[in-house]
Image (spheres, rainbow, N blue to C red):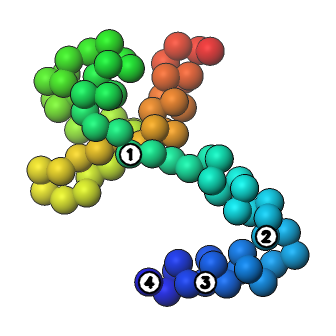
Amino acid sequence: MPGRAVWWWRVEAGPSWPCALGAWGRDEDQLLTIDQVAERLAVTEDWLRRRPDLPFIVKLSDGTVRYSSRRLATYIVRQTGR
């Protein structure tokens, strides 16, 4: 993976690599399962399946979907105004 190799080279060679590593570890996006997202949104899994245009969906392959925790948090903030 060339992109990853470049990233690590920049982290190791750059003057602020401890900050980059620390931020990367703390701010990592997690992929959630449908049951985790349904619980957080207080909806059914079927409700989520019927909405393929939600902005936090990450399609891994045909029939395999996960949900971005970072984009889900943004979605909740925008929907609730908090």
Question: Alpha carbon of mark 1 to alpha carbon of mark 3: how far?
Answer: 24 Å
User: Which residue does the image show at 53% across and 78% down from the upper left?
Assistant: 4
Residue placed most toward the observer, 60 or 25: 25
> In the image, which disc is placed on residue 17?
2
Which residue type does callout 1 highlight?
A: Leu
- For marks 1 and 3, the one nearer the N-term is 3
Question: Alpha carbon of mark 4 to alpha carbon of mark 3: how far?
Answer: 9 Å
> In the image, which disc is placed on residue 6?
3
Q: Is 58 displayed left or right of 78 in the figure?
A: left
Regarding residue 57, the answer to whether it shows in the image is no
Mark 4 lies on a secondary structure that is loop
Which residue type does callout 4 highlight?
A: Met
Mark 3 lies on a secondary structure that is helix
Mark 1 lies on a secondary structure that is strand
- For marks 4 and 2, the one nearer the N-term is 4
Question: Alpha carbon of mark 2 to alpha carbon of mark 1: how far?
Answer: 25 Å
Q: Is 6 displayed left or right of 64 in the figure?
A: right
Which class describes the residues within 10 Å of circle 2: few (<14), some (14-19), or many (20+)?
some
Which residue corresponds to mark 4? 1
